[in-house]
Structure formats: C-alpha cells, structure tokens
C-alpha cells in the first residue's frame, strides 16, 4: 500500500469518529414562550432604586459625617486653586496699600473698599451660572440645593473673614484696636450677605448688579455708612444696625425655602 493510500484510509477512519450535530431551529411558539419567561423574571425581580440606596446610606451616617461630606463636596466645587488665588490677591492688596498710604486712617479706608469689592467678585464667581451637568448633579444630590449653596456661602465668607481680620492689622499697624476689627468685619460680612441673598433671590446677573450698585454708591457718595472708621460719629450704632440688617437678609433664605415647599 502506497503512502497516499494509507493517508486516505486514515482520513476516512478519523472522519467516522466525528458525528455531525445540528441544533433544531426554534419554532415561533418557543420564541414567544422564552420572551414571556424573561418578562416574568423581570417583574419578579424589583429594579434597584439607586436613589433609595443613596438615602439609606446617608441616613446610616452620623450627623458629623454628613456635615463633613457636605463641606467636602462644596470645597471641591469651588476648587483649591481659586482659594489660593483669592488669598494671594487679598495679601497683595493689603501690602500695596500699607506701603503707599500716608496714614493709618487713609490706608484703612482705601483697603476696606478694595477688600469688599473683592468679596463681591468672589461671591459672584462662587454662584456663577453652571453648566447643565453640574445642575443635574446638584439636583440629584442627597443634600437639598439650598444647603449646598449656603455651605458654599459659608466657605466664601469664612475664608474672607479669616484673612481680613489679621490683614487689617498690617494696614493700621500699632493703632489697630478691636474697633478696627469691627469696622473691617462688618462691611465684609454685609457685602457678602448682600451678594449672596440678591443672587439667591434674583439670579446671578441682577443680584451682582445690585450689589455693585450699593458698593459704588458708598464709594462715590461723601456721606458713607458702610465704610466707617472708629473715629466717625455713631460708629458702633451704625455698625450694629448694618449687622442686624445683614442677619435679617440672611434669614430670608430660610423663608424662600419654606415658600418653595408650600408651593409644592
């Protein structure tokens, strides 16, 4: 037997070891029955409610953890770079004025005007119009939007005031007293509240315009109420009135929340 014949014989022998198997084509009734079974399984298994899982997880956290998570989320919204730039700009304004002012009173008056203008700019930036993606994330968050915005406001004002109080001492020098700290705290707090409340109620453009109008009116008018120094008449009385107005305006945010809930 030749080699070719041997190979042919082996090939035929191996072919007999393989059986051909063909799966039968499913009928229309079998296909419909399979689809119905799949639907029944889906109905029996309730879909996962991601919102419910999120709320359950949040409710299991302690109050301290909830507050920390809230602050961390809003810190990420504003951005570390923005905080650093704001701080550097405040320091630059302080040292520029302190080195070029003829006396402490004149330097302080000029310094508080520029610092409050910076506060208005930071408030406007923090509540600037956001893209649709950020709005969706805010609305889907476990925390209400009003809490998120108020936390952002606390960040802005806290950072501004922490820097404002010690920087004011560089401007007034040895003449710095508690009254100078009051006269630097009140205007910064007032313009921060005005910017926040007007933007919250009327929108970013209108609110920022109103805040800037109030600032320019105080800068251009000879009789100033918001930029008083310790030596001015009725200094403490005027500042206490301004502080009271600021607190009342800030409390109006709570009224809007209740008003929105009643409408729903």
Image (cartoon, rainbow, N blue to C red):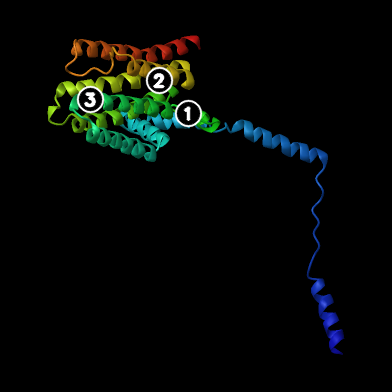
Q: The N terminus appears in which quarter of the rendering?
A: bottom right
Q: In which quarter of the image is residue 193?
A: top left
Give the left or right position of residue 90, taking residue 59 as reference: left
Measured in 3D between alpha carbons, the distance from the residue under mark 1 to the one under mark 2, in whole angstroms, is 28 Å
Disc 2 on helix, strand or loop?
helix
Q: In which quarter of the image is residue 109?
A: top left
Front-most of residues 260 and 123: 123
Front-most of residues 72 and 3: 72
Kindly identify the residue that appears in the image at 47 percent across and 22 percent down: 204
- Label located before the other in sequence (1 or 2): 1
Q: Nearer the viewer, mark 1 or mark 2?
A: 2
- Label located before the other in sequence (1 or 3): 3
Query: Can you identify the residue that label 2 sits on?
Result: 212
Check if mark 1's residue and mark 3's residue have beta carbons within 8 Å: no
Q: Is residue 99 above or below residue 193?
A: below
Query: Can you identify the residue that label 1 sits on?
Result: 138
Kindly identify the residue that appears in the image at 22 percent across and 20 percent down: 183
Disc 1 on helix, strand or loop?
helix
Which disc number belongs to residue 106? 3
Residue 127 % position (x, y): 44, 26
Kindly identify the residue that appears in the image at 33 percent across and 33 percent down: 68
Measured in 3D between alpha carbons, the distance from the residue under mark 1 to the one under mark 3, in whole angstroms, is 44 Å
Residue 230 % position (x, y): 17, 18
**How crowded is the residue under tag 1: few (<14 C-alpha within 10 Å), some, or many (20+)?**
some
Residue 47 % position (x, y): 57, 32
Disc 3 on helix, strand or loop?
helix
**How crowded is the residue under tag 2: few (<14 C-alpha within 10 Å), some, or many (20+)?**
some
- Label located before the other in sequence (3 or 2): 3
Front-most of residues 212 and 22: 212
Measured in 3D between alpha carbons, the distance from the residue under mark 3 to the one under mark 2, in whole angstroms, is 22 Å
Q: Can residue 43 be seen in this view?
A: yes
């Amino acid at each position: 037997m030749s080699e070719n014949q041997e190979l042919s014989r082996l090939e035929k022998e191996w072919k007999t070891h393989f059986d051909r198997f063909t799966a039968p084509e499913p009928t229309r009734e079998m296909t419909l029955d399979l689809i119905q079974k799949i639907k029944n399984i889906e109905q029996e298994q309730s879909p996962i409610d991601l919102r419910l899982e999120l709320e359950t997880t949040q409710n299991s956290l302690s109050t301290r953890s909830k507050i920390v998570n809230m602050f961390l989320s809003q810190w990420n919204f504003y951005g570390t770079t923005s905080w650093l730039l704001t701080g550097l700009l405040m320091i630059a304004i302080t040292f520029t004025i302190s080195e070029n002012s003829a006396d402490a009173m004149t330097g302080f008056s000029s310094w508080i005007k520029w610092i409050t203008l910076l506060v208005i700019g930071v408030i406007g930036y923090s509540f600037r119009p956001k893209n649709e993606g950020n709005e969706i994330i805010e609305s889907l968050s476990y925390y209400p939007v009003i809490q998120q915005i108020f936390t952002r406001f606390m960040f802005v004002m806290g950072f501004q005031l922490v820097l404002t109080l010690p920087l004011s001492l560089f401007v007034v020098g040895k003449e710095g007293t508690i009254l100078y700290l009051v006269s630097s705290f009140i205007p910064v707090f007032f313009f921060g509240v005005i910017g926040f409340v007007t933007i919250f109620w009327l929108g970013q453009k209108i609110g920022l315009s109103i805040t800037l109008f109030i600032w320019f009116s105080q800068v251009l008018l000879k009789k100033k109420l918001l930029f008083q120094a310790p030596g001015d008449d009725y200094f403490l009385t005027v500042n206490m009135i301004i502080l009271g107005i600021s607190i009342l305006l800030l409390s109006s945010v709570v009224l809007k929340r209740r008003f929105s809930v009643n409408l729903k």
